[in-house]
Amino acid sequence: MSTNYDPVAHSTRFIRRATGVAVFGVLLVAGWYLRDLLLLVFAATLVACLLVSVSQFIAHFSRLPRGIAFGLSCLMTLLIAIGFFWLLGSQLRMQMMELWEQLPELLKPIEDALNIGSVEEWLGDQLETMLSQTSVMSRIAGLSSAAFGFLANLVLVIVAGFYLALQPDLYVRGIVKLFPQSKRPAVENTLADIGGSLRYWLIGQSLAMLVVAGLTYIGLALIGVPSALALAVIAGLLEFIPFFGPILAAVPAVALGLGQGPHVAAYVAILYLAIQQLEGNLITPVIQQQSVSLPPALTLFAILAAGILFGWLGILLATPLAVALMVLVRKVWVANLDRTP
């Protein structure tokens, strides 16, 4: 029995595979060293998803061209931010300053219980370290200020998100062209599904954050806890991080409640627990029914893994990253398994 063995073709296939593995390894190493920048790119993509969602909403109900709808979405987002800080900015700033001034007193019981030094200084050092580690713009410009680097990164994300949302098809086509002709329709379909899932998730999460902030403010105001607006804003922002965010948001509120008496602290703890139960069992499932449903255990492990690998920025973006990966696994891995006889 003779076999047709072509050593040239065999060597060519081996060289191609070896080259592919080498290129993949180089990209993997480069991606690891550029992980902070890649996370900022993903954050800019989320900003773009939000702007695109608002512009699609405006275009759908107003029948305006996409360009005009996009301009209105940017203008409306800017006006909402300016209006919020114009109406509540001074009150929020004063309450935030009051919270910061009361921080040493709030942390004193923790220091006594753990028999450690200044928790305030330790938290400040940790915050400075975290900001400097992920401050891409500070590294590029050679700046040592972590706060400036954080603000620069924030501006970078917003500006990049604006440009991504301005011409999303341009960037999608660029990614699609990196793949062979036969794979491009599948890649484009996968990118569309990822973008749609992220848009639904982001809209739902934004609404959930607003609801949590509103309920927290009403509850704290009724209980009589000081700095209710600042605590409500903190609760709404930290709602972006599942599991750990609500716990962190409850700590200063309960501590302020203790200053007014144990019964007030108990009321505050019950309020935060009730809001989280309402959010987890009613608000989020209803709002995000069009988005990818992430099992709680998977979300928890995704946050832990992202925190270990990428630090605080990974924790912040862990859930939307998990949403994108879920769609990618479903479209690429699971679909191929279903087609396998």
Image (cartoon, helix red, strand yellow):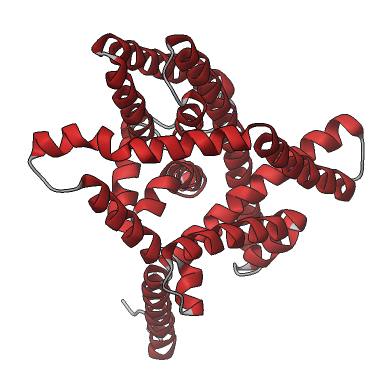
| Quadrant hosting residue 6 | bottom left
Residue 35 falls left or right of residue 183: left
Vertical placement of 62 versus 215: above or below? Answer: below
Q: Quadrant of the N terminus?
A: bottom left
Q: Does residue 162 sit above or below 273 in this rendering? A: below
Residue 71 screen position, x and y as percent: 83, 48
Q: Which quadrant: the C terminus?
A: top left
Residue lying at 48% horizontally and 41% vertically, measured from the top left: 323
Q: Is residue 245 left or right of residue 53?
A: left
State whether residue 18 is above or below residue 314. Answer: below
Nearer the observer, 48 or 140: 140
Observer-nearest of 110 and 239: 110
Q: Residue at x 55, y 21 (%)?
A: 214
Above/below status of 25 relative to 96: below
Residue 96: tell me if it is visible: yes
Q: Quick check: 184 left or right of 152?
A: right
Which of the two residues, 334 or 188, is positioned nearer the viewer here?
188
